[in-house]
Image (cartoon, rainbow, N blue to C red):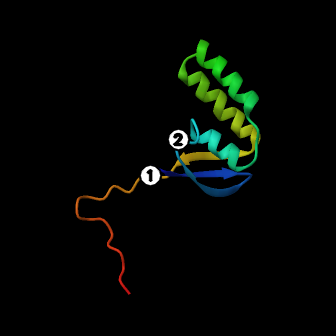
Amino acid sequence: MARTIIYTYKDEEKTLTFSYQQHRNIHEAVAEAEGIDITDFLKMEQQLELISDSKAVRNYRDNHFKKLGFGVITMKPKENLGVGKKPKPQVK
């Protein structure tokens, strides 16, 4: 199921459709959307995952993406509607 990413790149807020079938995480998706090659970063991140805890990896990722010009990178919250509460299509 596709989700929406909300991110800031060079002080401009943008949105992007995201699926785990295409990318490992939202950071890979936004880098690809902006045309940034992160292959060296991914190699280093994998090495860090082998020797460090998840907090160290997360800090490394966040700091690297700040250097690339990204601000906030997050998923848009899902709209959880109750049973029978889904919007009905408008008939013209």
Task: Name the front one of labels 2 and 1.
Answer: 2
Label 2 packing within 10 angstroms: few (<14), some (14-19), many (20+): few
Q: Position of residue 42 (x, y in %)?
A: 68, 28
Give the amino acid type for the residue marked by disc 2 in the picture.
Answer: Gln
Q: Earlier in the sequence, mark 2 or mark 1?
A: 2
Q: Is residue 6 above or below residue 22?
A: below
Q: Is residue 57 above or below residue 62?
A: above
Closest to the observer: 64 or 81?
81
Closest to the observer: 10 or 40?
40
Give the secondary structure at mark 2.
loop
Q: Residue at x 30, y 65 (%)?
A: 86
Q: Position of residue 61 (x, y in %)?
A: 65, 31
**Residue 77 disc label:** 1
Q: Position of residue 5 (x, y in %)?
A: 55, 51
Question: Farthest residue in the front direction?
Answer: 21
Q: Position of residue 53 (x, y in %)?
A: 55, 18
Closest to the observer: 81 or 70?
81
Give the secondary structure at mark 1.
loop
Judging by the rendered image, the residue that carries numbered circle 2 is: 21
Give the amino acid type for the residue marked by disc 1 in the picture.
Answer: Pro
Work out how far the residue at label 2 is from the one at label 1, CA to CA, in angstroms.
19 Å
